[in-house]
């Protein structure tokens, strides 16, 4: 008896049309296999999600805002310490308001109240403590965090989402304390010159990075984040060069040390600015409602200047003072 020839399906170990389980067969309306047929290894085709656009005028506005914050902090350092504390509290209040509106913690009133209270306490400690030291700021930070924990646990919602709320409170507290460290730095010999060099580097780096995005945001850092890598690198380089030039111009500073301190401060500033963009993209991917338009766009620069302040303090202490 002659052998029965094998079918093409048997030769390749594939399921025959009749023997294929119904769970593995998907047909469209015309009787054809759909794109997620397991025999082809393809998945059902889906329309690509549109990427968030790069808004040129928004990038220009954010660049101008970053420059404005840097100028306010630099010019304020040239005044008396009490006057600088007033300027600093205004910047801290803006930081608290923007961060609360953008991050939307479960207990925004508690987070905002704690942030403003810590801002007042740290500014007063930075101005009136003799000698100038960061230790009083640490005490105020600890007290503020404890008050924040008590406030979170005693709110009507109880412990619901308490971890998220405490995290937001901690970030806001650290941000306002970081700003206050500039007041302590301004009381040191050559501290004002160090503030000019470091904060100029951070502000210029943020401005160039955002301005470059308004021209061409290339290469795109991530599909969901409308930022370009070229602007980040260029901004850091220009900020470092500006710090070196300032060190050559101001008495008591050297170009090399100023450039190194400016480099450290600029890197921290642009990285914080980028991380805020990633955090916002993550919230959108998770399905959360986007934050208020204005707060969402200025959260990056104000947060970058906040957390660049301790970097400026450390770099100045090691290299400039």
Image (tube, rainbow, N blue to C red):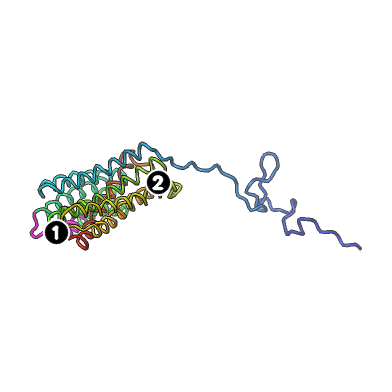
143 within the magenta span: yes
In the image, which is nearer the foreground, mark 1 or mark 2? 2
Q: Is residue 136 in sight in this rendering?
A: yes
- Expressed as whole percent of the image width and height from the top left, the position of residue 192 reads 15, 53
C-alpha span from label 1 to label 2: 38 Å
Disc assigned to residue 216: none
Residue positioned 22% across, 60% down in the render: 314
Q: Residue furthest top?
A: 57
- Expressed as whole percent of the image width and height from the top left, the position of residue 166 reads 28, 54
Disc assigned to residue 136: 1
The 10 Å Cα crowd at callout 2, few under 14, some 14 to 19, many 20 or more, is: many
From the image, give the main secondary structure of the stretch colored magenta: helix
5 within the magenta span: no
Residue positioned 16% across, 46% down in the render: 76
Q: Quadrant of the C terminus?
A: bottom left
Q: Quick one: label 1 or label 2, which is nearer the N terminus?
A: 1
Residue positioned 31% across, 38% down in the render: 61
Quadrant position of residue 213: top left
Q: Secondary structure at mark 1?
A: helix
Q: Residue furthest right?
A: 1
- Expressed as whole percent of the image width and height from the top left, the position of residue 305 reads 26, 49
Residue 259 position (above or below residue 90)? below
Nearer to the camera, 305 or 92: 305
The 10 Å Cα crowd at callout 1, few under 14, some 14 to 19, many 20 or more, is: some
Residue pointed to by mark 2: 227
Q: Is residue 308 left or right of residue 184?
A: right
Q: Quadrant of the N terminus?
A: bottom right
Residue 192 position (above or below residue 210)? below
Residue range of the region highlighted in magenta in the rendering? 128-144
Quadrant position of residue 174: bottom left
Nearer to the camera, 2 or 239: 239
């Amino acid at each position: 008896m002659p052998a029965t020839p094998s079918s093409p399906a048997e030769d390749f170990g594939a399921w025959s049309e009749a023997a294929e389980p119904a769970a593995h067969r998907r047909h469209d309306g015309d009787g054809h296999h759909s794109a997620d047929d397991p025999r082809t290894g393809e998945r059902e085709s889906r329309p690509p999600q549109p990427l968030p656009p790069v808004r040129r005028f928004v990038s220009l506005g954010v660049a101008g805002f970053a420059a404005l914050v840097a100028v306010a902090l630099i010019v304020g350092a040239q005044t008396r310490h009490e006057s600088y504390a007033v300027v600093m509290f205004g910047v801290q209040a803006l930081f608290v308001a923007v961060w609360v509106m953008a991050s939307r913690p479960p207990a925004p009133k508690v987070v905002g109240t704690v942030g403003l209270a810590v801002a007042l306490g740290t500014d007063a400690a930075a101005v009136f403590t003799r000698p100038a030291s960061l230790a009083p700021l640490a005490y105020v930070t600890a007290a503020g965090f404890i008050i924040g924990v008590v406030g979170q646990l005693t709110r009507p919602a109880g412990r619901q989402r308490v971890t998220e709320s405490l995290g937001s409170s901690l970030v806001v507290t650290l941000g306002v304390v970081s700003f206050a460290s500039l007041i302590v730095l301004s009381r040191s010999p050559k501290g004002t010159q160090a503030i000019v060099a470091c904060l100029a580097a951070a502000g210029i780096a943020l401005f160039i990075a955002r301005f470059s995005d308004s021209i061409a945001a290339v290469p795109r850092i991530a599909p969901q984040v409308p930022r370009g890598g070229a602007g980040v690198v260029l901004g850091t380089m220009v900020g470092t060069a500006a710090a070196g030039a300032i060190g050559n111009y101001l008495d008591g500073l050297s170009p090399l040390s100023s450039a190194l301190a400016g480099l450290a401060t600029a890197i921290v500033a642009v990285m914080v600015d980028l991380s805020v963009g990633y955090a916002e993209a993550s919230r959108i991917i998770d399905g959360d409602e986007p934050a208020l338009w204005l707060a969402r766009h200025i959260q990056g620069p104000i947060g970058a200047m906040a957390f660049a302040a301790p970097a400026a303090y450390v770099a100045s202490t090691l290299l400039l003072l």
